[in-house]
Image (tube, helix red, strand yellow):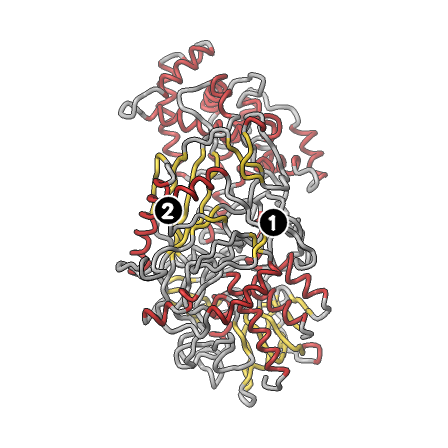
Amino acid sequence: MNRREILKYTAMLTGTAICAPLTGIMLSGCSQQVKETPAAHSSLVFFNSEDFTLITQIMDVILPKTDSPSASEVKVNYILDNMFDQVYKSDYQQKFTAHFHQLKSFLNSKNFDSLDRKEQETLLLSLEALTENQRNEAYWAYIDLKQQTVAFYLSTEEIAENHLNYLPIPGEYKPCVSLEDLGGKAWAI
Amino acid sequence: MGDITMNKNNEFDAIVIGSGISGGYAAMELCTKGYKTLVLERGPMVQHGDYPTAHLDTWDLPNQGKVSKQEISKHYPKQSRLAWWVNEDNKPFINKDDEYPYKEDERFDWIRGHHVGGRSLMWGRHCYRWSDIDFTANSKEGVAVDWPIRYADIEPWYDYVETFVGVAGQAEGLKQVPDGVFLKPFPLNCAEQKMREAVAEKYPDRVVTPGRVANLSEYNPEVHKGARGQCQNRSRCWRGCPFGAYFSSQSATLPVATETGNMTLRPDSIVMEILYDEASGKASGVRVKDANTGDVIDYSARIIFCNASTVGTTAILLNSRSETFPNGLGNTSGELGHNIMDHHYGMGAHGQLPGHEDDYYQGRKPVGFYIPRFTNIDEQSKRTDYKRGFGYQGEAMRSKNTPDGKIGADLKGEIFKPGGYHVRMTCFGEMLPHHDNRMYLNFDERDQHGMPIITFDAKLRENEMALREDGVKSAVEMLEAAGCTNIESHNNLTAPGACIHEMGTARMGRDPKTSVLNKWNQMHDVPNVFVTDGACMTSSGTQNPSITYMALTARAVDYAHKQIQAGKL
């Protein structure tokens, strides 16, 4: 089963009422979280294995595992890979690829791979701290990744239902409520 | 091509062509008055509740709810010109361009959904009354032709349809959008209320009011008949509402029509032409092609209501050629297909609204705010640079929170909180009727059903361009008045059609020489044919038009009924 199919079936898995037979396929074939192995990477549809590994690392520095899952634990890396393949237009694909190449060179030059987590954070934050006229392609690739990582992370079922306020059928509309009364959390949808 | 058959079973009292917002209304009114009514819909059946994506969340849909590039380029190259329109959640109700071809001399974004219920399933649901500012505008300015009706003619019919439809809204006492029969509004949230007050203080003539929408904020089964129910504030209306909370043909008019036992609904029925009987000087019926079998069948009726949408109706009329009407049924004026209008948008502004850190909302109301037109409504608001005006739809919502300069656990401490309030407003402008803006049939090219290809030749002109400028400027002024920061404005020209409010191609008027329909939506030339969809409109106003189509439809059915009773029709 390739990634594209998984996403399609994920829709059916979570919308349990609509397609019971397919949930069986899903559970038997792909219930385990995809491990970071070259074999798993064969399901990639846009990025190559090397770039995907780096993207996954960056995403997990941006959103590491704490009392909530890391970005890759909820498969934000695979969501991104799929979006690039299925949705994003070729001019954007090319632009991102060029920017990402620069980001990769920059991180390699700083031995990103061998840094500890704190050092990785500091390095990425140094990119973010660039002033407007210093901002280079590596900066744009990183900011792009950060924005998408957060957006897709928040739109996963795991995060939406367990770490945000999720109210599928609100019933009443209340125009002014206290954020504090909602536990300080945003609405998932 | 199958046989043309004609038998007893093909006779009806009335035929309604189209099952969308006005066709459903015509069907209901005719059936409840006792007419055996045939409702013809060119698309397939959609039953109420047959809404496959109604309960799916983002993570349940492929590609974060976006339709893949491959699918877009294969099926939706034109429908997706509206960047916001074709999504995984509403895709089931959007026509595939490869199945419904049309041509353009000038770009025209013809956005459609061919199925029972038509676009009443995906409509924006905003309902604003027209006023005499609109009905007298053509006459006062010497533009096109005068409307043959005034507000007083339609006012009781607005009352009538609003009561049944259920319009949530707030009375404001405004002459440009008269108050109607309202259910309680979907209230402004804290930030929107602040904006209302700040704008009112600086610009007393600009009113930020809760959008008036056909969603049941209060459900009363006594009047909201059919398959209706209380709005659950999910804001997933365009997927079809399993609660029947917004007005659609499926949730409201068709169930009521069905209950009378007088309706025969025939989906997959492409109306090829309306048949004209030279001897009686009336239409005798319609010729239909079954979309699945290709069989051609004639149906006869005493009266015919055309509700196939502005463009659909006009195409049928243009294709209904006879010795008397070589250029299309009821087209002695030569105006059929001309004067096509839409609203135009793509201009507006957005910005951050600081403060309100602890103010949040609960639920996803199906509408934000509306700012009715405020220019050229009286002597004080008169503009020298353009005619007519524009209104706005907008909202204030808290955005996602992805702060700069944070990463890792620090960032995670922020992203589960809501970001600050963001206000957006989109301007919708009036489009003047212009004879050269038109649609026509290309008889040299045919679609898969053998029908001539509909072709568009229309564009925005000088007046539209001028009012857009003021629309953008005024949007920025209001955001500034509200205290917004980081304000950005935009003015991206849309093509006609893009607002999905196309209208005007069989206009009403006083003079048969310059208009197609009289003041009762009745063809000047063919008295038993009525057109009560958007084709009838003599000007476009700035208001979303559907509630006006419904009011005109109910009024026209009432008139036809009285004429029949009096033996005149």
Tell me the amino acid under the disc marked 1.
Answer: Ser
Q: In the image shown, does A102 or B214 lie closer to the viewer?
A: B214
Circle nearer the viewer, 1 or 2: 1
Residue B15 falls in which quadrant of the image? bottom right
Q: Quarter of the image containing the C terminus of chain B?
A: bottom right
Residue B567 falls in which quadrant of the image? bottom right
Q: In the image shown, does B116 or B549 lie closer to the viewer?
A: B549
Callout 1: chain: B
Tell me the amino acid under the disc marked 2.
Answer: Gly
Do callouts 1 and 2 mark residues in contact (Cβ within 8 Å)?
no
Q: In the image shown, does A41 or B336 lie closer to the viewer?
A: B336
Callout 2: chain: B
Residue B488 place in picture, x, y as percent:
34, 39
Does residue B444 show up? Answer: no
Task: Name the secondary structure under disc 2.
Answer: strand
Residue B102 place in picture, x, y as percent:
45, 62
Please give the label number shown on residue B491: none
Instruction: Mark 1 or mark 2: name the one nearer the start of the chain.
Output: 1
Task: Name the secondary structure under disc 1.
Answer: loop
Q: Quarter of the image containing the N terminus of chain B?
A: bottom right
Residue position marked by numbered label 1 in the rendering? B217
Q: Residue at x 40, y 13 (%)?
A: A122
The image shows residue B147, relative to residue B364, as above or below, that is below
Q: Residue furthest bottom?
A: B279
Q: Residues within 10 Å of mark 2 (few under 14, many from 20)?
A: many
Q: How much space separates mark 1 and mark 2, taking CA atoms? A: 28 Å
The image shows residue A186, relative to residue B208, as above or below, that is above
Residue B454 place in picture, x, y as percent:
45, 66
Please give the label number shown on residue B348: 2
Residue B209 place in picture, x, y as percent:
47, 49
Does residue B416 show up? Answer: yes
